[in-house]
Image (tube, helix red, strand yellow):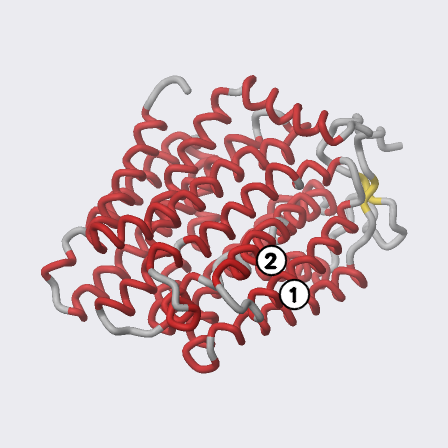
């Protein structure tokens, strides 16, 4: 008979009679549902980025103010991971996913109906908070998966999440160019609502594994932060890489619109280069297994810094040359960013198997604080120092991440 898991274990048991028996393979339909839900959830964070120029024209907002839109989304996501993710150990994760799905659909609808920039900023913050359903889905997949298939199933769900990041920019950029930016948020709200219906029908129930109060759950993350120097290094390094990543994506659409006179579809098309990140997930994981996580993180940070440094050479090129340079750099830094993230996750999850959900919350809080900071800094730098200034900012932030990983102690 299987032992009852300890109260503060991350892994929750399944109480629904529909849940697969231990050792049995998950239905493909359930794996597909989890992967699709993770992708749609995280995609909500990135719809706005290729459309910022259109939003600015419609709402009469300047470049610096526009940077607050992705900043609020990323800040909401960071707060959601920090404040909401630990609840998965305390309550039925299925109910949490359903509530977040409903809130996310409403927030996307509110974004599409926003009459002015302040209303859009509030809706963007809520989008970020509710989009953390993706961080509930990945642990759910790990819980449902039998041990012998856990890596494959979690990898499939992560691929869905990465494709959501990739396709969100492409789809939103192309759709906004044809129908306007508001239609993108409306369509996204419908998709999330449909996903919620599928979750309601397809997800089993999860039994809570701890009776700790909310404050105790948050306090346990503080204790983990103090206990593990490796966790502090990982969160800081990934956060610095995220500053560079977000500064680029939060300003690209505005730069293409103002400098190269290209529309939102062109900005979204650069998201196709993010396929490199999806390819890096399994490759970097295998390399980390064979050579250790440290070398993968350092190589990823170095590649990210080099890719952004190349962008500083674009000022003297023709428009076509700049586009080709940006596309090549995007492949490089997406590959480096994703390789570092997978290696950091592998490293952090090994610290305490009984606290993986909270370790994950700390890591991703650091990452998305970096995302929010990068969005704000990138817009400010673009306004005062131009595109070359953004490239310098991103290069410096990635180099700082590399220095963190080269240091022997946190």
Residue under numbered circle 1:
192
| Secondary structure of residue under mark 1 | helix
Labels 2 & 1 near each other (Cβ < 8 A): yes
Give the farthest residue toward the left. Answer: 316
Image quadrant where residue 293 sits? top left
Residue 298 shows in the view? yes
Q: Residues within 10 Å of mark 2 (few under 14, many from 20)?
A: many
CA distance for labels 2 and 1:
7 Å
Indicate the position of residue 99 as horizontal and vertical percent values.
74, 54
Q: Quadrant of the N terminus?
A: top right
Q: Quadrant of the C terminus?
A: top left
* Left or right, residue 395 beside residue 74: left
Indicate the position of residue 32 as horizontal and vertical percent values.
66, 61
Q: Is residue 92 above or below residue 316?
A: above
Q: Nearer the viewer, residue 267 or 8?
A: 267
Indicate the position of residue 387 as horizontal and vertical percent values.
23, 55
Indicate the position of residue 321 as horizontal and vertical percent values.
16, 66
Image quadrant where residue 217 sits? top right
Dot 2 or dot 1, earlier in sequence = 2
| Secondary structure of residue under mark 2 | helix
Q: Residues within 10 Å of mark 1 (few under 14, many from 20)?
A: many
Residue under numbered circle 2:
41
């Amino acid at each position: 008979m299987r032992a009852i898991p300890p109260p503060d274990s991350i892994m929750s048991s399944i109480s629904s009679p529909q849940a697969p028996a231990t050792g049995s393979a998950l239905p493909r339909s359930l794996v597909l549902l989890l992967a699709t839900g993770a992708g749609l959830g995280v995609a909500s964070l990135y719809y706005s980025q290729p459309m910022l120029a259109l939003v600015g024209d419609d709402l009469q907002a300047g470049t610096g103010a526009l940077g607050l839109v992705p900043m609020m989304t990323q800040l909401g996501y960071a707060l959601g991971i920090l404040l909401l993710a630990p609840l998965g150990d305390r309550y039925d994760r299925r109910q949490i996913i359903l509530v977040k799905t409903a809130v996310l659909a409403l927030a996307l609808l509110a974004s599409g109906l926003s009459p002015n920039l302040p209303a859009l900023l509030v809706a963007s913050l809520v989008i970020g908070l509710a989009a953390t359903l993706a961080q509930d889905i990945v642990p759910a997949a790990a819980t449902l998966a039998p041990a012998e298939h856990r890596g494959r199933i979690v990898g499939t769900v992560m691929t869905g999440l990465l494709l959501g990041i990739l396709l969100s920019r492409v789809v939103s950029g192309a759709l906004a160019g044809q129908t306007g930016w508001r239609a993108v948020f409306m369509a996204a709200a419908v998709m999330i609502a449909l996903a919620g219906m599928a979750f309601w029908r397809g997800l089993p129930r999860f039994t809570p594994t701890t009776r700790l109060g909310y404050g105790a759950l948050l306090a346990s993350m503080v204790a983990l932060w103090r206990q593990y120097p490796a966790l502090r290094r990982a969160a800081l390094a990934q956060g610095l890489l995220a500053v560079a990543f977000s500064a680029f994506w939060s300003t690209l659409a505005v730069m293409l619109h103002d400098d190269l006179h290209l529309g939102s579809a062109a900005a979204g098309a650069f998201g196709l280069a993010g396929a490199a990140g999806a390819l890096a997930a399994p490759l970097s994981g295998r390399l980390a297994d064979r050579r250790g996580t440290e070398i993968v993180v350092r190589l990823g940070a170095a590649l990210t810094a080099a890719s952004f440094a190349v962008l500083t050479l674009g000022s003297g090129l023709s428009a076509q040359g700049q586009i080709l340079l940006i596309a090549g750099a995007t492949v490089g830094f997406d590959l480096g960013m994703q390789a570092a993230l997978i290696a950091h996750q592998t490293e952090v999850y090994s610290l305490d198997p009984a606290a993986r959900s909270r370790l994950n919350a700390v890591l991703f809080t650091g990452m998305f604080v970096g995302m929010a900071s990068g969005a704000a800094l990138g817009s400010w730098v673009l306004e005062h120092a131009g595109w070359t200034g953004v490239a310098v900012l991103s290069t410096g932030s990635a180099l700082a991440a590399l220095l963190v990983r080269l240091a022997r102690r946190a």
